[in-house]
Amino acid sequence: MKREAFWGILVSFLSLLVFATAGFGMEAQAVLTEIQNRYEHTRDFEASFVQEYIGKVMRQSQRSDGKVYFKKKGMMRWDYRVPNQKLISDGQTLWLFQPEENQVFLYPAEEMIKEFGFLAGAGDLRRDFKLLTPHELAPEKENTYVLELGPMETHPVVSRLSLRVDQKTYYIVQVDLIDGLGNVTRTRLTDIRTNMDLPNSLFQFKIPPGVDVIKSSPSHSSTGGKGPQKK
């Protein structure tokens, strides 16, 4: 998995673990506040997802799908059907398991949480992002509202986030992450279920015997460090 794609997934995490309550013609700031309020009362959720990476230059999309689970604080699990891989965090360790390559990447979840505190319940969209669409929101196609956000501080991967909110259920059903080069990581959610009391064991991963273990750090990757180190 490329570094850009990995960071794209992580940034998608912070955007996906939110839910909205809004009315027709609401100011974007009010919608943003309601998103934050709903998130703070959401213990966990699960959903089916389809994810696409759309390159700016070649315009060729790479598609993946599967099931995703989130739980506070910092716990997450992405079970990819295509490609066959798993991305799991217990709040301390982040595992990226690629069985066909017989390898697993280990990342310190604490560093990731410091970068993206929102997914751990420590962040605030209103503090960490600025509205790029401060005007009233009218329903877009597919009966959704669209909220455009930009990071308060320059980020090596995220240039802009576009959140699509269902007008009837007020769930965030799509996140578009746009990087500085114009590449888009698009994640769509369906069959969303919230506050399911997911067990902590769901967010544990036992490394199979004989698998290559590669220790890495997202922060090192983003700053041009040494990168992954095989164990």
Image: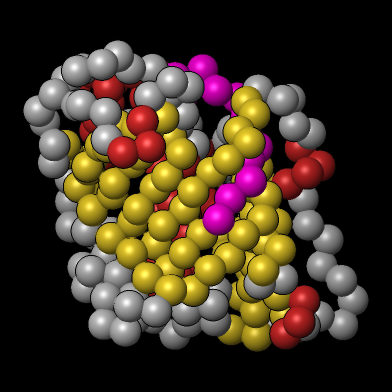
- Spot the residue most to the left: 135
Res. 223 in view: no
Position of the C terminus, as image quadrant, is bottom right
Res. 135 in view: yes
Q: Is residue 226 left or right of residue 47?
A: left
Q: Position of residue 31 (x, y in %)?
A: 27, 22
Which residue sits at x=78%, y=57%?
Answer: 205
Q: Position of residue 15 (x, y in %)?
A: 41, 42
Which residue sits at x=33%, y=17%?
Answer: 22
Which residue sits at x=23%, y=69%?
Answer: 182
Q: Position of residue 124 (x, y in %)?
A: 33, 31
**Which stretch appears magenta?**
38-50
Magenta span has 48? yes
Tell me: residue 59, above or below residue 44: below
Position of the N terminus, as image quadrant, is bottom right
- Spot the residue most to the right: 209
